[in-house]
Amino acid sequence: MKGLSLGLLLAAGVFFAEARAADFYVSPAGSDGWSGRLAAPRADGTDGPFATLERARDAVRELKLRKRSDIEVLLRGGLYRLDETVVFGLEDAAAAGQSISYAAFPGETPVLSSGRAVTGWTQAPQDLPGLPRAARGQVWTARVSGRFSTLYDAAGRLPRARSAGFIPEEGSGRDRVRLPAAAFKEWQCVEEAEVVVRPHHAWVLNILPVRAADAAERMVYTSVDSTYVMNELTFLAGTESCWVENVLEELDEPGEWVLQRGRLYLWPRDGAAPEGITAPGLMEYIRVEGQIDADGPADVPVRGLRFRGLTLVHGARDTLSNEDRGLQHDWEMFDKATALVRLRGAEECAVEQCRFAYSGAGAVRVDLHGQRIRIAGNVIEHIGGTGILLCGYGPGTKDVNRDNLIYNNDIHDTGEIYWHSPGIMLWQSGGNRAANNLVHDVPYAGIVVSGVMTEFFGKGGGRRELAGTIRWHEIPGGKGRRTPEEVQPYLHSRGNRIELNEIHHAMKTLADGNAVYIRGAGPGNVIRRNYIHHLVAPTALQAAIRTDGGQRDTLIEENLIYQCTSQGIKLKLNNSAVNNIIADVIGCEHNGKTVAPRYIALLEGPTTGAVLQRNILYHSGGPVNFFYQGAKTRGRQPARARDADTDFNLYWCADQPDAAHETLARAQREGIDAHSRAADPLFVDPQHGDFRFRPGSPAAALGIVPIDVSAIGLRTE
């Protein structure tokens, strides 16, 4: 590693207030044959720190047999290359009242990487079969061992060679895609290629290994099924939604690379001979694993481990398999090693002040049994998958992923490979608090709370998406369809608090998504005092906050939504929106039509029991739809504001006051909004995002509470 890869990572280290004595030390200049008691090697080379995290872990096992107070291991700055995942099991757990920490030495940055330098480069022959004309004389090659799907240089992750995008043609399925005549080529080594596709809908991206290709049919067959049929996108007709990667015939731009038959081909992005090229060996660097009773009621968790101030880079990418079970719309996989740090059966552990960067999969995940885990103060950036995932057991009676804290993390540029990956995702996990996080510049959703939608209980586990996670042996009556009321006791993403987070520039790539999304979760979730702004992707399918099909009993309260395209809050059923400020929603073009901005969209009923009160809907100018009420679709009941408790709202359109007055008059004719007003809320400076109230604001008379944005987002303490 050099340049950005090591120099800037070391410069961006975590600093501590003062040096302190530790029980053991680790250093790249150390030796596992030494005592580990010294922070630096002795001048005579007779003793010093350990060389590896594994050796320090083993030394702690012995020490904790005689020491009951806290134990600390400090890692000196420098590069630690991992050949295997470092696993902490029950024998590594802290005693009651004790913590065991593995932390950065004060003022230094230990960097963990599984990357291995690629050496032995030679220039590829200019007459190499299949090499595009533009690449001749530009490409270098080296013999490598193993398979990998990510590659890094000093500037970060390098893109794989990819074909031009195309729209799949009729005859495509979940394991096959038919290409247009202009797109199909008889690629060499097609069995080492992958199909990258947004199948059918706009909310997921699959990367599928190729099994074979048929030139006569222009068909490419995959060895793993896509989430949905690989046909033209239903919501974004005309969008090029598919392409082929890792074929030499498409290596036609600087920075691109291909791996075929044990040989790596690279067109360096700087035009010089390759230097500092790194290929990953691992996807999972650290795993804390307790005793998992997968089918039974009781696990034995590892307790009391803390990881602080570490930097983890250059990890591998996940590949779908036929054994996978997907979460939500295959946005993540159930109980799978898809993150650099994984806690699987853990309690009272922490991941703090770490940095996760330039890697192919996720950063942190807490699987199955995870309680009172603290994930705080981390920087997560430029990774291929999900930032932070809490993933409990599937629907059933076992509910042991809960009461965790996700606090003060800076999460950005996630999902760089799997575009659908959320910044934060809570699945079958309840009683958690996700607070004061900054999530920005992500291709899809910022924060997702979900479980399993009712309709998947009727699928019996026959597909990858969700159904295979259901614990049928814990559900009376076994497999079969259930009503929403019957399903509710088995949905454990209940009672979560999503609060004080700042989310901006989400939804940059995919469509039909949201900054905060909740579906198939249990009751009692609260989405409160978040600042969501500048969702600027030009699609009518997104919203700042959305409750989706089947979601009930959710409170959306005191959020500030500003400059978000298409829709402010999207509601279904009895979910409530109270005391939110929604300002300057942006209209857009969709499938050739102009769509006016919708401030609150009601899309599925019955809305009986919902509360829609004390919201400020403020529009600077242009066409506006303050309350959109969707028609009955697919047998579902229509959503109507009159069925909810709708009142004390404040409507205003700065350049067209009549639009606000007409909205209020129409509502009052429907028997709602009796005390609501159409009036200027008197914000301090709405054109520059300052939504404090000036003296005399009518908001106060309506009982609307001001939103203090100074308490939202990252904390410096």
Image (spheres, grey):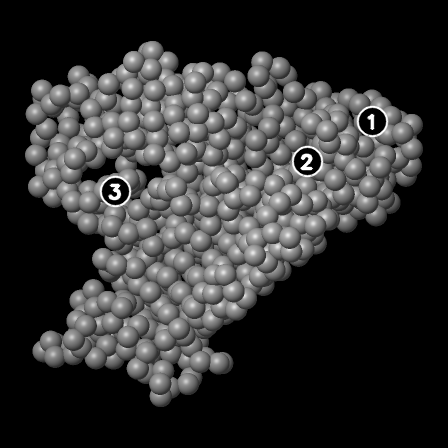
**Residue at 47%, 41% in the rendered image:** 464
Between 73 and 175, the residue placed more toward the observer is 175
Residue 190 versus residue 129: which sits nearer the camera?
190
Q: Position of residue 290 (x, y in %)?
A: 42, 68
Between the C-alphas of marks 2 and 3, the distance is 41 Å
Q: Amino acid at mark 1?
A: Thr
Q: Is residue 226 above or below residue 48?
A: above
The amino acid type found where label 2 is placed reads: Lys
Query: Horizontal and vertical percent for residue 14?
Result: 38, 60
Please tell me whether mark 3 sits on a helix, a strand or a loop.
loop
Q: Is residue 392 visible?
A: yes
Earlier in the chain: of badge 2 and badge 3, it is 3
Rounded to the nearest angstrom, the CA distance separating label 3 from label 1 is 57 Å
Label 2 secondary element: strand
Q: Nearer the viewer, mark 2 or mark 1?
A: 2
Instruction: Using the image, tell me which numbered label, if any, was put on residue 710.
Output: none
Label 2–label 1 contact, CB within 8 A: no
Compared across the picture, whether 102 is left or right of 444 comes to left
The residue mark sitting in front, 2 or 3, is 3
Q: Quadrant of residue 384?
A: top left
Tag 3 residue: 148
Q: Residue at x 67, y 45 (%)?
A: 482
Of the numbered discs 2 and 1, the one sitting upstream in the chain is: 2
Q: Which residue is mark 1?
A: 663
The three-letter code of the residue at mark 3 reads Phe
Q: Closer to the camera: disc 3 or disc 1?
A: 3
Image spot of residue 683 (x, y percent): 73, 39
| Label 3 neighbour load within 10 Å: few <14, some 14-19, many 20+ | some
**In the rendered image, which residue does mark 2 sit on?**
570
Answer whether labels 3 and 1 touch (C-beta < 8 Å).
no
Viewer can see residue 525: no
